[in-house]
Amino acid sequence: MKKLMWVCLILISILSLFPFYMMIVMSTYFNEDLFKGIPLLPSDYLFENLKTVFKSDFLRVYGNSLVVSITSVALALFTSTLIGYAIAKFKFRGRNFLQIFVILTMMVPTQVGLIGYIIEMRHIGVGNTLWPIIFVWMAFPFGAFFMIQFMRDAVPNDLLECARIDGCSEPGILLRIVLPIIKPGLATMATMVFLWSWNNYLLPLVTINKSDWFTLPLFISNLGMVHRTDYAARMAALAMTTVPVLILFILGSRTFMKGLTAGAVKG
Amino acid sequence: MKTIGVKKWATMLASLSLLTVSLAACGSNNNNAAPSATTSAGASPSASQAASANPNDLSGTVKVWDWDETFQKGMIPEFNKKYPNIKVEVTVVNPNDYLQKLQSGIASGSDVPDIILGESAYRGKLFDLGVLDNLEGAPYNFDKSSVLDYTVPYLQNSKGELIAIDQAITPAGFAYRRDLAKEYWGTDDPAELEKLISSWDAFIAKGQELKEKSGGKVLMFPGLGDAYIVLRGQNFNSYVNGTDVDLTSKLQKPLETLFKMRDAGILGKNELWTPAWSASMAKGQFMFYPMGPWGPKWHISANDPEGSGKWGLVKAPEGGFTRGGTAIGIYKDSKVKEAAWAFMQFAYLSDEGSAYNFKTFGNMTSSKAFYENEKALIEAPGAYDEFFGGQNLAKYFMENIVPDMKGEAQSKYDSVVDSVFNALYPLWTKDTSITADAALQKFITEVKNKATEATVK
């Protein structure tokens, strides 16, 4: 039985890792050789592909994406934690309404609000910069919802009461007691927001009109595009785009898993 | 849990102020980031006031969305030699996303380029949006008799206004493999080949012969898509009248010929633009690829970089057709219309710009004057003539293919028809029991589904 389990695990691992392997191998080929057969072994064209990628400002684009994703994560965590803490742990008028409102906004697809959002951004005066694709994570309904649920399940009210009785200030309670408890939740959300903003295509596509502000998905879709699609160069860029995220996920996977299962069993 | 008290309100206020501070920080950062975007808007008005014959007097920043960055990077410095005060800013936009990006830009009132490109795939839809200026009016006063006559219908909207110019003309013939033609048909001379495939029946017969002689290794076209481009393109009849879409008159004959070819087994099973399709050029599995003047650079030599000397150009059976093509217009609310027009004229119509364009990229302008004034340039070997076995491609296009070209009116239904075809032909490739008639009926139904307001027959 154990053997069977191992075989299954190995098989599934190979199946899910194979595309990553293919991506890396494909980035070492000359584009037109890619489709002559299934490329299983690395070839010798990696350097040329990297040249194609780097000759078009890849580092700046990479920087843009990093700035966007990191800032988005920071802002999303900040607002979601505050909303979550307030709604889950305080009683005040309009609390239920707020919670329903958060869920309602979750139900509106991004595409529907897109034009309105762009108009809003333009009026704030940040059209055609990186800000619109960062700000979108600041009012992030799913994050707020996630944090409300997480706080409700993971942070015991008695603990907060104890802290208050012991004379801890309210900001102190949040920073010293609540934050350490919700670390797995924060890590989970950080990973998700990072991934989503890292891979976001539609919003940057419609809001960014200057090559200087391109993010990675836009850049890759524009790479080697004129009448001939340079898949090999795209794969090289994609590999460089995916690997850091992969590493991030592996590093955070322990806390990530904890976050996803938190509250599943109540003690 | 306890009810919120004064202390808590204070805390919440504190966190709110923290949020505001962080927001304000974002705002101030943004001021550093924004100038590049604002300068262009600030510089704009000067251009619209300065309508003058002296190129130095025109100034402003012209925004262009283009997918071909190489072209713009080459052309803009040439343009600036003559117009030093006009700045041209290029944003690279994937043609697949172009219309969506443009529409959301217009709808939200944010950035819209001054110069808008309409690729053949969405040109009819773009024309129908009503966002392009009439180029025959002021301040452009463009004379449509100055461009090749057959191109005019491709540049007009349904009201008959001329709202664009051609990036380059796209009359098309076949790129063919000289080595294969010589091996199986005994000749690689374009004039001889023209005679061998003078009609579609002759083409099919030759294809069967080719298939037999090569033992099925070499076929005529890579797939149904390639053949359809030619057959549909050769039917220049307009099929749209308001919301009446007459597919039967447009597609019946092309589909019949297409299915005849499929049943004769002379077409491959590749879908257009797939990796396998691109790779087939270097492999020598197919004799013909439909090709316009942009093809030698972007299509053939890009996919078969070691194929120099192996390729030739011949006209299609029963006449020319168009392959691709991009219309270029000016946004009707642009603030730099004169400057934008100066760039368009220089890059796509003027003798100097066209000469540079032709020499560097092999693009052929639609301006009649160019072919009169720069005869020597057309006669001289072009950038890709060597690749095509020393054949003078430009001359062949102009003398053998352009004369029997006609124009085809553009319509917003074109892209619907194209997308329906693209969705259907893979099935026609696989399921050979589908007949031309059944295919046409299915085609009509699908177009009806996608264009519900139209009467399709």
Image: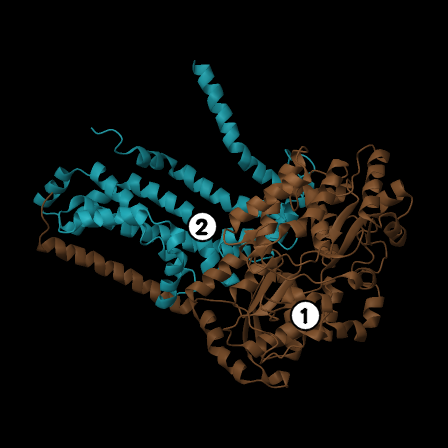
Chain colours: A cyan, B brown
Q: Residue at x 28, y 41 (%)?
A: A183
**Label 2 vs label 1, nearer the camera:** 1
Q: CA distance from mark 2 to mark 1?
A: 36 Å
Residue B453 in the image: x percent, y percent? 50, 54
Q: Which residue is mark 2?
A: A200
* Mark 2 on the same chain as mark 1: no
The front one of B66 and B324 is B324
Quick one: SS at disc 1?
helix
Q: Which residue is mark 1?
A: B348
Q: Is residue A166 visible?
A: no
**Residue B225: x %, y % from top left:** 68, 45
**B28 over B226 or under it: above or below:** below
Is residue B257 in sight in this rendering? yes
The residue lying toward the viewer, choosing from B377 and A63, is B377
Which quadrant is the N terminus of chain A positioned in? top left
Q: In the rendered structure, which amino acid carries the disc numbered 1?
A: Tyr
What chain does badge 2 belong to? A
Observer-nearest residue: B378 or A52?
A: B378
